[in-house]
Image (cartoon, rainbow, N blue to C red):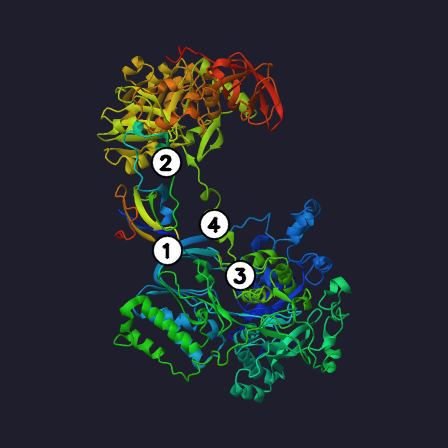
Amino acid sequence: MLMIPCPWCGERAEVEFAYGGEGGLSRPVVPGDLSDGEWADYVYFRKNPKGTHCELWHHLHGCGRYFEVVRDTVDNKVHGSAESGSDIRGVSDVKKV
Amino acid sequence: MSRHSRRIIGRGRVNFGRTLRFRFDGAEYVGHEGDTLTSALLANGVWLAGRSFKYHRRRGFYAAGAEETNALVEVRGMDGLRAPNRPASELRLYDGMEAFSQNCSPSLRYDIGALRGSLFAPFLGAGFYYKTFMGPTRKGWRFYEHMIRRAAGMGRLSEDVMDHAQHESANLFTDVLVIGSGPAGLAAAGAAAASGARVTLVERDFAAGGSLLGERGGSQADIWRRRILSFLEESENVRIFLRTECFGAYDGNCFGMVERLREAGESGAGSRSRLWRVRARRVILASGALERPLVCEGNDLPGVVLSSAARLWLTRWGVLPERRIVIAANNDSAWETAEELAFAGMEVGAKITLLDARREGAGSERLQRLRMRGVEIHLGYVPIAVRGGRRVKGLLAAPFDADANIVVLDNDNDNDNDGDGDDGAGSNGGGDSAGEGGTDEGTTNEGAVKESAEAMETDNGVGDTAGKVAGKTRYFAADMVCLSGGLDPNLRLWSQRGLSPRYDEKIAAFVPGDEMPPGWEVVGGARGTFSRGEAIKEGRRAAEAAVGSRAASFGADDDNGGALADIFTIDDGDELARGGWRVAPCPLWLSRGGEDAFSRRAFVDLSGDVTVKDMAIAVREGYNQPEHAKRYTTAGMGADQGKTSGTNAAGILSLFAKRKMERLGTARPPYTPVEIASLAGAEVGRHFRPVRRSPLHDVHLREGVQWIESGEWMRARYYPASPQESVEAGYVRESAAVRGGVGMTDVSTLGKILVQGADAEKFLERVYVNNIASLKSGRVRYGVMLRDDGMVFDDGTLTRTKDGGFWITTTTANAGAVLQRLEFLHQAEWRDLEVFLTSVSDSWAGIAVAGRESLSVVSSVFADDDIASLPHMGALEVLYGGEFARVHRMSFSGERAYEVFVAAHFGVSLWERLREAGSERGIVPYGLEALDALRVEKGHITVSEIDGRVTLADLRFEGMLRRKSGLAVGVPLGRRAGLTDGDRPCLTGLRPLGAGQRIESGSVLFGMDGEMSGHGEGWVSSACYSGECGGYIALGFLSRARAREGEEVRCFNPVGRSVVVARVVSPCFVDSEGERMR
């Protein structure tokens, strides 16, 4: 079971959280400017990396916040977390909370 | 032999002063405090413990710990509860224990399955199921299924007895988790504890000490154990768990442990087990090593045991089950067994014979010592076959040339005993003293050892460590045969973390590789360190590394540290430090020639009845990869998960497949079986799946409600007018009352969310497809939100509150999902918006009053004059009991209606006042069924229609889309060609042509021509009886429904396979102009 560092509450057990999907995506600001293909990319396509992965977690049974976590999908090591929108993709040594 | 002469006085840790009575298979026995079921039964001369899983062969006690594969028993609990598959070796005896053997019918001694075993054995070889039931003969499954199902499965559950025992769960956080309390574990715990760190020591046994428990009381090793234990017990930062299984190692150094507080039949207060979720910063695995047997013919007969088990039975429980004992081994550990048995056996005249595959044995010093104690030793001999019928009679051994890796065997003893080893039940009808099924070789072979220098032609290209045969065999009569094929570091928990051990040729076993899970150390036997002195050093070093410099302080000033320093002062010459292997073991996977020389009675895996022949077949048929061979043969897949068989199976596979040593399979939790009840803990029944109750729950009870569980809610289904009234009669009556006058229903379950903040409006404009900006204060608006892919997500209402925020409602079913989705959009997607979302679902009670008399009812409760002038879709903030309340005039039923929301604690009072105010107008409470029927008549949708596959247009809601809705979630993708296709099924009404005919929801719609196959042209989503229409009606989705009104379609119900012809009509069956509600 993961220990997830919530930026607000500190390290907590995985059971307190809900997975929120891939992190670091940015929603199109002007939806009309996007082609169907770009929309499809945003709505349907997700990375499934072997290695570090930026993802959102929701502290559902805690503070209720969504935040970003960088986790290694191979050994489940959590490298760090940050408030959502910080864009910590590709950062493998984010300062641990 | 008399009953108690199997106990050696002065040995063991059993309290002879306290006698315990127990029953096994109905017979009464006596044991003592400190006994396990195994030791107590052996002391009573009972050898037969159960039947094997597949062939129902007779099996005896085999091991002294978790690796017991044979003696799995059922413990009978209170009220006849059955707790199956408990290893007898771990069952601490208690007074009144009632245990039963398994896999036997009608009884352990005479078992019908054994007949099946001997008849079918040739057919149940490796891959039997695959070959028989997945190929062209798969139809055979139907024929055999009931037989196989009856024969399969381990133990029995109590189907009709409820387990009333409590189980609990708890969390534990620790700095250092030490798993195993043998020498290495105790040393690690002691050294870690001295630093002041929180230390947790876990031991599966009911006593701490591991191998030290086999030492004589008062010996140096025993004193050491007691000293360090008392140090640990006195340390406040140390927690010791006994009788606790650390069964799983998970991510983030999280561990699952089950603390067994009582057996099923043991009386006592409190919970029977406690599940611990442990979080450890550092982990020291000191789980020791498990002995594996040697594989030879007949190695499963009762009386064949692990040599370590025989040693522990004697040293810990004072039981020497037999007097004629042969030990066959390839390593030094068995010599310790021989020494202990010989020492104790001298007094009672036991005869110990030791065979070692190695020509030098365990060294000359030990050889002399053992010979002086009267042990007969034959070096360079390996076991060929265990002889016997119901029990062990003797062991046939052959010289082994370790240099040439050749087992020397003469011809005559080969293949002459296919009859023996069979069960009496099959061949001669039983009777203990009757024929033993096969020849009694104790007399014939003993004197018939023949000399033969010729090698047999059994070499089928088998490689290094399968003995080949070249000389004279010897027969040794014996009542117990102890086998030792080496020690396997117990790495299960380590492997559960996804690591593979490497094969170490020096000790012929798998040891941990260099890679460790973060924070882990493996010490002692688990690491392949079999010397006690070394294990203690390793444990201490690992603990010091784990706790860092803090540990360095011990040995210095403080009292504890001083004591500990003393404890850790051990000389290499001390008795405590002895043990370990002086002479390398000689790896030996098979002690007899090629694969074909083996009959089906040389067992690799006792718990799954997997034989060497099965392994040979698997390789011959191409399953020579470890993972394939494991599944094809089921080796290592039995109840013990390969604890004693894994390495032997890997070795045999490496021989047959000519591969290097690779471990078979991976380790997964649990280490030993864990009862589901322990995992469930207190979360049973309603504690597992609680229900939510409306604040009006009690008032519904007073109204005589019939409940229905709807999602997590208990909701009022209908209120029967009489006990006989059916659901259908009830909802028809209730809806008629609403249409004819006035009714009231509980709508408290709707999701309710407050959306506040400067950007609340902007936020909701992006969430809903509707125009929100134009929503004025004091008005209610129906709103729809989409998913990103353009499908409808949820619907509900919005009201602008006086303070500029919004009060929105969601469907009952989606309340949680909508809030989570809004939080996601707010926090992850539109972080720049200033919005605050608050769930207020539980803060409000809601009651809908519907019908043309509704105004007079509501206004007589609320004094506010504005209620009378409240227009349709108007909202009013009023006071009720001095607190804010909301009155929304809106209609789900199609009648004039008001939804009144008050603080939850006023719900009951509001209901009662409305009920009273409406009494002279004949107000009727209506339930979920009537609510549903009324909305179907009106063509209003619920989650039955919003099933995740429909678009706005499918619901005929395209007009709802505001002009500049491009920013709203789901609108861009909702414009894709496939979703705007005019042929898509859209909402429609359906009426059966025939009077009294009913359409079932879930029916598939087909046109009047053609075959009814495939997905059809649409489906029925909701159906009910309509009083207004005088018949059954339905809502559904039909391709091009708008243009097809008046047409007929066929509604095919795939469940009843019935067809109803219906006319396509408008989805609004009553008051299509909406005059009533306005």
The residue wearing badge 3 is: B664
Residues marked 4 and 1, same chain: yes
Which chain is home to disc 3? B
Tell me the mark number nearer the camera, choosing from 4 and 2: 2
**Which quarter of the figure is the C terminus of chain B placed in?**
top left
The residue wearing badge 2 is: A41
**Foreground pick, B449 / B740:** B449
SS of the residue at dot 1? helix
State the CA–CA distance, disc 4 to disc 1.
Answer: 22 Å
- Residue A72 place in picture, x, y as percent: 36, 51
- Residue B602 place in picture, x, y as percent: 65, 67
- Can the viewer see residue A88? yes
Which chain is home to disc 2? A
Residue at (36% x, 19% y) in the render: B960
The residue wearing badge 4 is: B680
Place residue A22 in its image quadrant: top left
Q: Are marks 3 and 4 in contact (CB under 8 Å)?
A: no
- Labelled disc at residue B459: none
Residue type, mark 2 in image: Asp
Tell me the mark number nearer the camera, choosing from 4 and 1: 1
**Foreground pick, B700 / B974:** B974
SS of the residue at dot 2? helix
Circle 2 packing at 10 Å, graded few (<14), some (14-19), many (20+), is few
- Residue A33 place in picture, x, y as percent: 30, 28
